Amino acid sequence: MASEFSRILTLLRKEKGVSQKSAAESLGVSQALLSHYEKGIRECGLDFLVRAASYYNVSCDYMLGRTPDRTGATLSVEDLPEADAAGKENVFTGNVLTVLNKKLIANSLNILFDMLAKAGSKSLVSEVSDYLMIAVYRMFRTVYSANGKNQPGMFKLPDSIAVQYSGAAMEVHHANVGAIAEGKPVGGMDGIKDVDSLTMSTESISTDYPLFGSSLLNLVSSAEKAIGFSEK
């Protein structure tokens, strides 16, 4: 918890764009003491925690690393907006390719998660979800790092191990998904309850998913082209 606090305390100051000296003055401590807090050398008291949370306009739970939400809210299914929710966050100002690929991926995920729901395996849902979340994390982190002004403190894992560890974790989750799909779940994982519910064809995909089927079929074709394998 202490390391999380020091990391977040440093991140918030840099995001606010203030020097350590200026922040220390506003928080009523010496620069040396603030430096110790940010480096994790010393632990602060409750009064400083409250002052810092107020100064950076975040919750104490966020500062302690208890929640990734700056307001301190805990996330529930009801709190999450739909992927296609209206609003400025869903409006792309980029080119047509950006919008096209976003829709292909989002629509295909709708079908994938519908399949997971039919399979009735909590372990399968967890393993697939973890794999996809790490994939998005890796790409977001890579693009985020393109701007050298962005604060690396946003991430807990250092650059030196992030790529290797995340790649290894993805392989483990992929292997677990494969084991479950083959009817040989490992490590106490539960298997697929209704394999017949996953029976599909290109025709049934188009029929059962009239809004998303075309996206999935196009994604499959695009992905295989991107893989670049050709039989000679």
Image (spheres, rainbow, N blue to C red):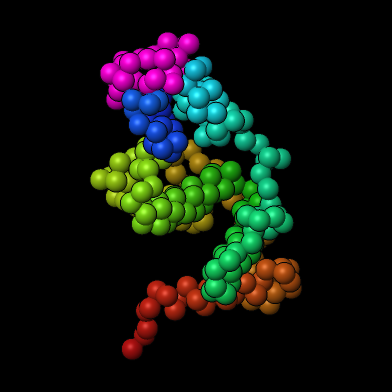
Q: Quadrant of residue 45?
A: top left
Magenta-span inclusion, residue 47: yes
Q: Is residue 201 visible?
A: no
Q: Main secondary structure of the magenta part?
A: helix
Q: In the rendered view of the protein, which quadrant contains the N terminus?
A: top left
Q: Is residue 149 visible?
A: yes
Q: Quadrant of residue 115?
A: bottom right
- Residue in the picture at 50% in, 28% down: 56
The stretch in magenta equals: 24-49
- Residue in the picture at 41% in, 15% down: 28
- Residue in the picture at 37% in, 15% down: 29
Q: In the rendered view of the protein, which quadrant contains the C terminus?
A: bottom left
Q: Nearer the viewer, residue 171 or 49?
A: 49
Q: Quadrant of residue 147?
A: bottom left
Name the spot of residue 82 as percent of width and height, x first.
69, 52
- Residue in the picture at 54% in, 22% down: 54
- Name, please, the residue furthest toward the bottom: 232
The relative height of residue 188 versus residue 48 in the rendered view (above or below) is: below
